[in-house]
Image (cartoon, rainbow, N blue to C red):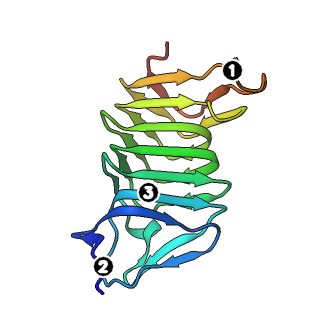
């Protein structure tokens, strides 16, 4: 049967989990938009006949989820996020991230490349640690630094570290 979850560069439906390895999708097209759930746990990649997703991905759709846990996901292009990016001690390395209205970045880890926030950034809330935006922040989106929740271990809570130029209002 033909693989039907990739049309016009948009990957839809399902969860694609690399768990530190390579997941090969037997299709002859590049994935440019994530409208599915992509889980990069401990590194790994998703490959098509047109190369790795890190070389072709440019957008996370409103129904797309990108999970980065304990590894680095290198994106060759600037990336726009209208969906959800979750960092669990992962690193998103990109030439730039634009968080669109309705888009969210949440967790602990590192984002390299300048970030333009038009959506929501939440530092924390899944564990104690740091959300580092190492190459600057701009935009008028919302930023939340999660406090420790009473129902969680006292060490839970977020820290936001900003590097580079900051042209945003943080309240």
**Mark positioned earlier in the residue sequence (1 or 2):** 2
User: Considering the image in quadrants, where does the N terminus appear?
Assistant: bottom left
Q: For mark 2, what is the residue?
A: 29
Query: SS at mark 3?
Result: strand
Residue pictured at 62% horizontal, 37% vertical: 132
Q: For mark 3, what is the residue?
A: 37
Q: Position of residue 26 (x, y in %)?
A: 39, 85
In which image quadrant can residue 160 be found?
top right
In which image quadrant can residue 118 be found?
top left
Q: Position of residue 72 (x, y in %)?
A: 61, 58
Residue pictured at 36% horizontal, 44% vertical: 83
**Mark positioned earlier in the residue sequence (3 or 2):** 2
Q: Position of residue 77 (x, y in %)?
A: 39, 59
What separation in Å lies between label 1 and label 2 (alpha carbons)?
44 Å
What separation in Å lies between label 3 and label 1 (alpha carbons)?
27 Å
Q: Position of residue 101 (x, y in %)?
A: 30, 33
What separation in Å lies between label 3 and label 2 (alpha carbons)?
18 Å
- Count neighbours of disc 2 (C-alpha within 10 A) and say few if under 14, some if 14 to 19, many if 20 or more: some
Residue pictured at 36% horizontal, 23% vertical: 140
Query: SS at mark 1?
Result: loop
Of 87 and 50, nearer the camera is: 87
Q: For mark 1, what is the residue?
A: 148
Of 167 and 123, nearer the camera is: 123
Query: SS at mark 2?
Result: loop
Residue pictured at 33% horizontal, 48% vertical: 63
**Which one is closest to the eye, mark 3 or mark 2?**
3
**Mark positioned earlier in the residue sequence (3 or 1):** 3
- Count neighbours of disc 3 (C-alpha within 10 A) and say few if under 14, some if 14 to 19, many if 20 or more: many
């Amino acid at each position: 049967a033909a693989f039907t979850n990739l049309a016009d560069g948009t990957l839809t439906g399902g969860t694609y989990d690399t768990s530190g390895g390579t997941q090969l999708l037997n299709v002859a097209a590049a994935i440019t938009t994530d409208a599915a759930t992509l889980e990069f746990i401990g590194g790994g990649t998703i490959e098509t006949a047109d190369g790795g997703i890190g070389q072709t991905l440019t957008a996370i759709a409103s129904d797309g989820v990108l999970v980065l846990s304990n590894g680095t996901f290198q994106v060759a292009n600037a990336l726009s996020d209208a969906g959800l990016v979750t960092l669990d001690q992962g690193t998103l390395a990109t030439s730039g991230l634009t968080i669109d209205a309705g888009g969210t970045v949440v967790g602990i880890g590192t984002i390299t490349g300048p970030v333009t926030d038009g959506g929501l950034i939440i530092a924390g809330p899944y564990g104690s640690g740091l959300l580092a935006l190492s190459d600057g922040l701009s935009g008028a989106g919302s930023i939340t630094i999660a406090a420790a929740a009473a129902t969680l271990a006292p060490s839970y809570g977020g820290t936001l570290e900003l590097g580079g130029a900051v042209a945003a209002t943080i309240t």
